[in-house]
Amino acid sequence: MPILLTWTIAYVIPALTADALVKLLPKQRGTFHIRNAAIMHGALVLSGLGSQYAIYYSGHAFPWGSSLTSIGLYVAAIGCAYTVIGKLGVWYGLSSLVQEFALLSIAFLLLSAYSFFTTLLLIVSIFTFSHLLHAKHWLIRVTVISLWGVTSITLFLLSHNIWVIASLHAVLGALFIKKEILYPSIHFRKKKT
């Protein structure tokens, strides 16, 4: 299967479908954040699995970069995110791994056929668009999310370690959530314990 067709099926269609569902389904008081997260993460898992299947089918192996040190760093990053934003930090830490799984799986596939810059354009544009669910701080969010997409793929190209990248994603994301730059509609306030 041509790689651009795989990109469309495994990355673009899940992202656009999830975005459409989140934007078009009626908001249910108090539960739509959970529903939207389930929709988005379901799409991310499908995207990652589709990309992984294409990688396997092409005869390649995805470089997970697994080591006890990198997995330990990821667990520590979840602990750090928990310290910054409470229970939400644990969920965001898990989310960061799912997001990186989808993003870096398709990046690995595209990098086998396209230049680094073409790969960035194909991935980061969709990644950034998928994060524009809220208007608040949109310019800062577009900038930060685009820079993270570029950084994530660059770090993967250099390290092939999804765990370290997900660790950075979790910690930096938690800090941006606390500042209400990411997900401002959550109205995050960490409860004092």
Image: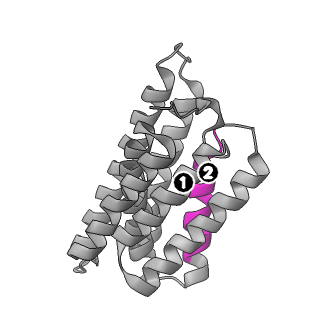
Report if the CB atoms under discs 2 and 1 are less than 8 Å apart: yes
Which residue corresponds to the image point at 45% horizontal and 51% vertical from the top-left?
Answer: 81
In the picture of the structure, the residue carrying the numbered disc 1 is 173
Amino acid type at image mark 2: Phe
The image position of residue 65, as x and y in percent, is 28, 78
Q: Residues within 10 Å of mark 2 (few under 14, many from 20)?
A: some
Amino acid type at image mark 1: Gly
The image position of residue 86, as x and y in percent, is 44, 39
Q: What is the span of residues highlighted in magenta in the rendered image?
A: 119-133
Which residue corresponds to the image point at 62% horizontal and 70% vertical from the top-left?
Answer: 121
Q: Is residue 13 left or right of residue 1?
A: right
In the picture of the structure, the residue carrying the numbered disc 2 is 176
Q: Residue furthest top?
A: 29
Closer to us: 120 or 77: 77
Q: 92 above or below 108?
A: above
Residue 64 shows up from this direction: no
> Toward which corner of the image does residue 66 lie, by quadrant?
bottom left
